[in-house]
């Protein structure tokens, strides 16, 4: 039997040699040892049971040599403290998107009091809409996606996490065209069609969730050009977008909502990542 420290050090070295993430190695070891990170580090000089090591090693090989994302090996990604099931039918929730959720919760507190109707367009795993419903019980959340398979994953997540939300299948705003909402949120596919994407992402995540037309702004244009039809007078639109599209997003927002308060917000890495449009606010 080898000690956890040795196993972790060797695996990190292997990851580095293959230009893979060291953090992914830790995620796998935590998963297969069924430990929280504080517990693992407290036991780092203990011996790792053989069966745990074997499962970890198989998984490590899949990650390093077969180019499989760790979230597809463990079957989930943690988002805002909740475990979301993921597979090849949905985008793996990203850490930046947690900040989108956080900012919507702030803006909600600022602008509203009591019940609001929220729609998450292109929900994928459901991470945004489900988290909002869990964090703010006053949010009555509808999630839409064009992909039947993605909705199946999102429905499982809502059930597992105990979120009382509604799902509708369809393209962009189509399924909610006859309704009115207080908050519209979307993290649509935003990679320009011709941009190079690393193979771990391109080979494993659904293209329909990644690419957003020639300049990556296709879905923002569709949503913004139709959003007035489904929004109440006092309302919030919140988008995540590519770090280099801040100015373009503000211009688009002002084009369709000239009287709105448009906020461009940076993520924890200091990159322009979110645009929030407030209609009828203070
Ligand atoms: N809304 C989901 C997420 O933020 C899916 C986004 C997408 O598929 N582009 O993870």
Image (spheres, rainbow, N blue to C red):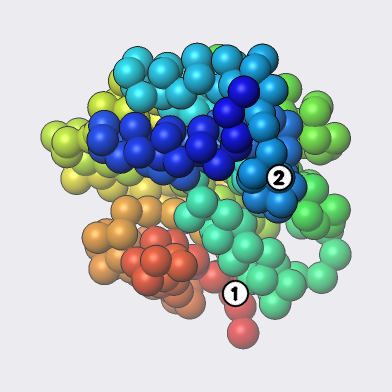
The CA span between labels 1 and 2 is 55 Å
Residue 237 is situated, as x and y percent measured from the top left of the image, at 53, 59
> Is the C terminus in the top left, top right, bottom left or bottom right quadrant?
bottom right
In front: label 1 or label 2:
2
Quarter assignment of residue 10: top left
Quarter assignment of residue 52: top right
- In the displayed image of the protein, which residue is found farthest to the left? 194
Residue 120 is situated, as x and y percent measured from the top left of the image, at 59, 43
Quarter assignment of residue 20: top left
- Classify 220 as above or below 121: below
- Classify 281 as above or below 145: below
Residue 247 is situated, as x and y percent measured from the top left of the image, at 26, 68
**SS category of the residue bearing label 2:** loop
Left or right: residue 167 compared with residue 123: right
Q: Which residue is mark 2?
A: 43
Task: Report the residue at 37% width, 48% height from top.
Answer: 220
Ligand 1 within 8 Å, label 1 CB = no
Task: Report the residue at 66% width, 15% height from top.
Answer: 51
Task: Report the residue at 85% width, 53% height from top.
Answer: 137
Q: Which residue is mark 1?
A: 280
**SS category of the residue bearing label 1:** loop
Q: Which mark is residue 272?
A: none
Residue 100 is situated, as x and y percent measured from the top left of the image, at 54, 58
Task: Report the residue at 35% width, 15% height from top.
Answer: 66
- In the displayed image of the protein, which residue is found farthest to the bottom? 282
Residue 215 in view, yes or no = yes
Front-lying residue, 240 or 64: 64
Q: Residues within 10 Å of mark 2 (few under 14, many from 20)?
A: some
Left or right: residue 166 compared with residue 241: right
> Is the N terminus in the top left, top right, bottom left or bottom right quadrant?
top right
- Classify 73 as above or below 77: above
Residue 144 in view, yes or no = no
């Amino acid at each position: 039997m080898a000690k956890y420290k040795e196993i972790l050090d060797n695996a990190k070295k292997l990851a580095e040699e293959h230009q893979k993430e060291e953090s992914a190695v830790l995620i796998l070891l935590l998963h297969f040892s069924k430990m929280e990170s504080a517990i693992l580090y407290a036991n780092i000089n203990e011996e790792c049971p053989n069966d745990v090591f074997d499962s970890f090693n198989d998984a490590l090989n899949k990650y390093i040599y077969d180019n499989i994302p760790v979230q597809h090996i463990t079957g989930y990604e943690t988002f805002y403290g909740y475990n979301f099931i993921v597979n090849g039918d949905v985008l793996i929730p990203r850490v930046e998107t947690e900040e989108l959720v956080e900012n919507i919760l702030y803006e909600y507190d600022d602008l509203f009091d009591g019940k609001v109707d929220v729609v998450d367009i292109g929900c994928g795993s459901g991470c945004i809409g489900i988290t909002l419903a869990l964090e703010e019980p006053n949010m009555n959340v509808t999630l839409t996606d064009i992909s039947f398979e993605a909705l199946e994953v999102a429905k499982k997540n809502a059930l597992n996490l105990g979120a009382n939300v509604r799902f509708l299948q369809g393209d962009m705003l189509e399924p909610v065209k006859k309704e009115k909402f207080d908050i519209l949120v979307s993290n649509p596919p935003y990679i320009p069609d011709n941009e190079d994407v690393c193979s771990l992402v391109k080979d494993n995540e659904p293209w329909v969730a990644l690419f957003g037309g020639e300049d990556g702004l296709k879905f923002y244009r569709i949503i913004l050009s139709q959003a007035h039809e489904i929004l109440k007078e006092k309302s919030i639109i919140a988008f995540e977008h590519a770090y280099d599209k801040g100015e373009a997003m503000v211009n688009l927002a002002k084009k369709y909502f000239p009287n709105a308060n448009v906020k461009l917000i940076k993520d924890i890495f200091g990159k322009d990542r979110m645009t929030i449009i407030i209609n009828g606010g203070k």
